[in-house]
Amino acid sequence: MDIQDWSLLTDLYELTMMQGYFETPQEQKKVVFDLFYRTNPSDASFAITCGLDQAIDYIKQLHFSQSDLDYLRSLGIFSDSFLSYLKDFRFTGTIYAIPEGTVVFPMEPLMRVEAPIMEAQLVETALLNIINHQSLIATKAARIVWAAEGDPVLEFGLRRAQGPDAGTYGARAAVIGGCVGTSNVLTGKLFDVPVKGTHAHSWVMSFPSELEAFRSYAKQFPDACILLVDTYNTLEQGVPNAIQCFKEMKEAGYELKGYGIRLDSGDLAYMSKQARKMLDEAGFADAIISASSDLDENLISSLKTQKAKISLWGVGTKLITSDDTPAFGGVYKLAAETDEAGNWVPKIKLSNNPEKITLPGKKKVYRIYDKETGKIKADLICLETETLDETKDLTLFDQTATWKKMHLKAGHYTVRELLVPIFVDGQCVYTSPKTMDIRAYAQGELGTLWDEHRRLKNPHTVPVDLSEELYTLREKMIREFK
């Protein structure tokens, strides 16, 4: 996608704050911002971080064209000296991020931006826009794929997405979350992911008869012949006509593969059972029965409970819009700044809402795994200077109910640092994997969750704890401000 003109993809106050910094001694100050979220979407116990590849492109190409500067000048609120500064603007800071496809949890930094204050301030809005949306869709997809219990899930949502970018990058995020392909051809081209599709009711309606429509489609696409059978009467006409078409294909010498029917309306559990019986009796036991029709993880789970005979799921509106949770809720908060001597000074935001109190200082995130199973035991947010030693016992404690502790014996756990360098002093040092490779990585990540963490209703939460040093710093700063 062309993002050459995204420098103005920002809120006005980012630019007015930049000018304010420019006109004060704070211009040279360096800061650290954390991008994180507070609540998991869709009642999940986790999220899948996504969007880093697009964020990298945005940072690489961030500059102000003459057209941008002319527009800003026309607003009549920016000084000539500030606009002159923007003319040569480039991002020179350092960014750490958790790689795309990683399982993540509330409050831990998904991205840490360390840069001169004006640069760090400017990128806030675009980074949140990118990471929030794509992480939301990847997470929703992961839940839907989990509900499908191993059946392939296709993303079919472009026509219902909130615009072209949401449809295209959302489809990519859905694939990363576990979908096997998408109907979005542009996503297929841009990100080299499989594109899939069948035909519409209008195809059937445009022929003199349903059987003629099926025959014509089968002739053109014999190796991917999924026939939509509910245009007129699913069980009395659609499925029998599909069976007749499959018989004719077989008699004509076609090797039937990737073939079957699609149900897009009605009682999907009942229809699929009846269609399965009809197909099996006709000798087409390997025919696919796919379904669409406003599916989400809850309906798919219900259909699975009802023993529906569906083996391929096409999910559109409720995936690409994350129908039940329309926003991810990521935020971008100041965590540290340099003093006059260049030393890092932690910063904290207080609030009457305890969940909105931020974590001060430059931080890192350690993931702690059970050594025997490879499953996640907990995440630990630490100050940047801290390290964990797997050869020593480790005790974690709940930051709210501090008497709740987890004791891990040396040799029985492993640790992994999640944040990795993306930009260093303005230079990109990270190469994004291909989308399908990120998908494979994400599937491995989801495998590190216990089943109790992935269940759709009332999942068990993964502990995200603070190191004793970070906890002490936060409590000290709260007391001082009080």
Image (cartoon, rainbow, N blue to C red):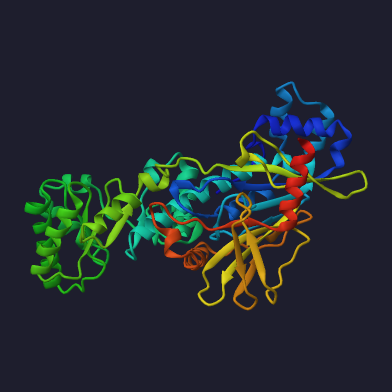
Say which quadrant the C terminus sits in.
Answer: top right
The picture quadrant where one finds residue 357 is top right
Q: Work out whether residue 461 or residue 319 is closer to the camera in this orientation and state it.
A: 461
Q: Work out whether residue 297 or residue 156 is closer to the camera in this orientation and state it.
A: 297
Q: Against 276, is 320 above or below? A: above
Q: Please provide percent x and percent y for residue 301.
A: 30, 55
Q: Looking at the image, can residue 5 be seen?
A: no
The picture quadrant where one finds residue 249 is bottom left
Q: Work out whether residue 317 or residue 194 is closer to the camera in this orientation and state it.
A: 317
Single out the residue that lies furthest toward the right.
Answer: 341
Single out the residue that lies furthest toward the top.
Answer: 76
Q: Against 239, is 62 above or below? A: above
Q: Please provide percent x and percent y for residue 143.
A: 41, 55
Q: Please provide percent x and percent y for residue 349.
A: 71, 39
Single out the residue that lies furthest toward the left.
Answer: 236
Q: Please provide percent x and percent y for residue 310.
A: 23, 60
- How many labels were placed on the picture? 0
Q: Is 201 positioned to the left or the right of 473 in the image?
A: left
Residue at image x 68%, y 43%?
Answer: 358
Q: Looking at the image, can residue 226 be seen?
A: yes
Residue at image x 54%, y 64%?
Answer: 434
